[in-house]
Amino acid sequence: MDKQKYFISVGQGEISRIPFQGNDDFIIYATQEEVLMLRRKFEGLHEASFDTYKRSHLPFIPYHLDTANDVYDETIADVYRMLYDLGDEQTRNHIQTMGILDEI
């Protein structure tokens, strides 16, 4: 499969072939299968974010014992790990400076 250039906005959960209105936080080169995997990760990130929102309304659950936060943290790390693996040099450098992935 041929890899195509994609523009990524993590905050918006957007994957696009065309740069538009700030969706170019990161640039990756990916196959259609890899893009589908990244879309699934973004969906998981959205679900995890919603779960943390729901938990925030239950003050009797201590933050440090909240599995929803752990799932969100793991999912966002998975997203950035995939962006790092598929990204161009600028994307990889940016993710390295963020310090979000310990193993890099």
Image: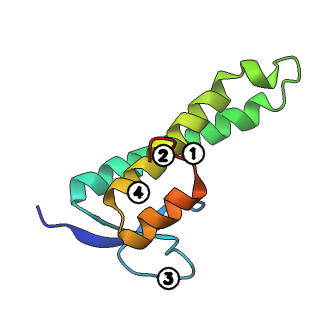
Q: CA distance from mark 2 to mark 3?
A: 21 Å
Q: Dot 3: few (<14), some (14–19), or many (≥20) neighbours within 10 Å?
A: few
Q: CA distance from mark 1 to mark 3?
A: 21 Å
Q: Amino acid at mark 1?
A: His
Q: Residue at x 43, y 72 (%)?
A: 90
Residue identified by numbered label 4: 83
Q: Nearer the viewer, residue 25 or 35?
A: 25
Residue identified by numbered label 1: 46
Residue identified by numbered label 2: 43
Q: CA distance from mark 3 to mark 4?
A: 19 Å
Q: Amino acid at mark 4?
A: Leu
Res 68 quadrant in image: top right
SS assignment at label 3: loop
Q: Earlier in the sequence, mark 2 or mark 4?
A: 2
Q: Earlier in the sequence, mark 4 or mark 1?
A: 1
Q: Give percent across and percent down for residue 66.
A: 71, 22
Q: Earlier in the sequence, mark 3 or mark 4?
A: 3
Give residue 20's mark: 3
Q: Are marks 1 and 2 in contact (CB under 8 Å)?
A: yes
Q: Earlier in the sequence, mark 1 or mark 3?
A: 3
Q: Residue at x 66, y 39 (%)?
A: 50
Which one is closest to the eye, mark 2 or mark 4? 4
Which one is closest to the eye, mark 3 or mark 4? 4
SS assignment at label 4: helix
Q: Are marks 1 and 3 in contact (CB under 8 Å)?
A: no
